[in-house]
Image (tube, rainbow, N blue to C red):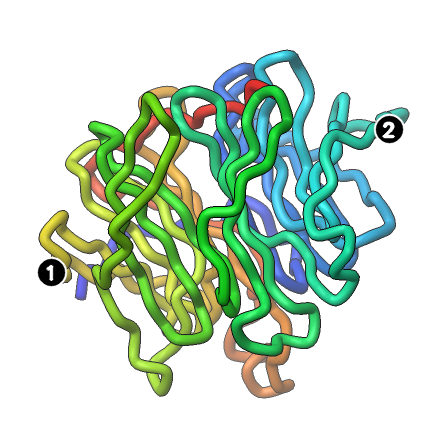
Amino acid sequence: MSSVDVELVADVHCNVGEGPLWDPRDGSLVWVDIVPGHIYHLTTASRERRQITLGHEVSVVIPRTSGGYVVGVQDGLIALDQIASGYTTSPLVDIEIDMPGNLMNDCKCDARGRLWGGTRARDWTPELGNLYRVDPDLGVTRFLDRISISNGLGWSPDWTRLYYVDSRPGTLDVLDYDIEAGTASNRRPFAQIDKELGSPDGLCVDSDGCVWLAVLGTSSLYRYAPDGSIGDIVELPTRQPTSCCFGGPDLDELYVTSAAVDMSEEQHAADPHAGGVFVLKPGVRGLPTDPFAG
């Protein structure tokens, strides 16, 4: 297990901080707090932080090529023009509007601007979620079903692999990916997290093709080599890391969101910055954020 310097960059005490992404347009980190519907924007150079509250659950915020952001909400995606007072939103596409018990969870975009995202049951009932692809023309295709908690997504540097987490069974799987067609196939196990240890959550991929996985409940990030072996485990100063992304001008800073939900008073006392955002320099670079082209 590696011990590296980890810095707290946003002491925001999120209930469930999630979906960190680097926005190179203005050198910022964006992320959400799911349940209260907070969206955060941190200019990392100045540490200036902005926040808006949409008033309903949000799952992710992703830059758009046309400006502004796309936001995951309960029954699909909406457009957000800015993360500042006076913002406006508009509907983009409905997903599972006929399933009011489900809501969107983690989403990411590929190099062609297609958005991949999944759903889960609000009451955590297993195998009610699905994984979808949303194209720039807003067409929606379902690729996987019987998912319990659709979570972390990421691609290999050459776009031939899609990594995908279903948190309840503790699985990190890999699929063959065709970047031209935007299709994923041949799903197979890549790594398994013991349920007694913790729960796999969000992930990102570095320029060496290694997968960084936040494991909720372990105070750790796991780094997997492309062959599925564990290359390193990085210890964090918070118990419930939820997701991670590379950022900074050189993409050499690893940002980690966390959660404060379901913690006892004793756990809060031992983890006073739970729900905050942390940063470390692991000695490798990440991959650029791909925006949504819709």
User: Residue 243, relative to residue 195: is it above or below?
Assistant: above
To which quarter of the image does residue 69 belong?
top right
Q: Secondary structure at mark 2?
A: loop
Q: To which residue does mark 1 refer?
A: 229
**Would you say 150 lies left or right of 137 here?**
left
The image position of residue 143, as x and y in percent, is 45, 47
**Would you say 284 lies left or right of 52 here?**
left
Crowd rating for badge 2 (residues with CA inside 10 Å; few <14, some 14–19, many 20+)? few
User: Which amino acid lies under the numbered mark 1 shown in the image of this protein?
Assistant: Ser
The image position of residue 279, as x and y in percent, is 41, 45
Crowd rating for badge 1 (residues with CA inside 10 Å; few <14, some 14–19, many 20+)? few
CB of mark 2 within 8 Å of CB of mark 1? no
To which quarter of the image does residue 222 belong?
bottom left
Q: Residue at x 70, y 52 (%)?
A: 96
Q: Residue at x 64, y 12 (%)?
A: 66
* Camera-side residue of 164 and 146: 146
Eye-nearest disc, 2 or 1:
1
CA distance for labels 2 and 1: 46 Å
Q: Secondary structure at mark 1?
A: loop
* Residue 20 visible in the current orientation: no
Q: To which residue does mark 2 refer?
A: 85
User: Residue 146, relative to residue 161: is it above or below?
Assistant: below
User: Which amino acid lies under the numbered mark 2 shown in the image of this protein?
Assistant: Ser
* Camera-side residue of 156 and 2: 156
Q: Residue at x 59, y 36 (%)?
A: 140
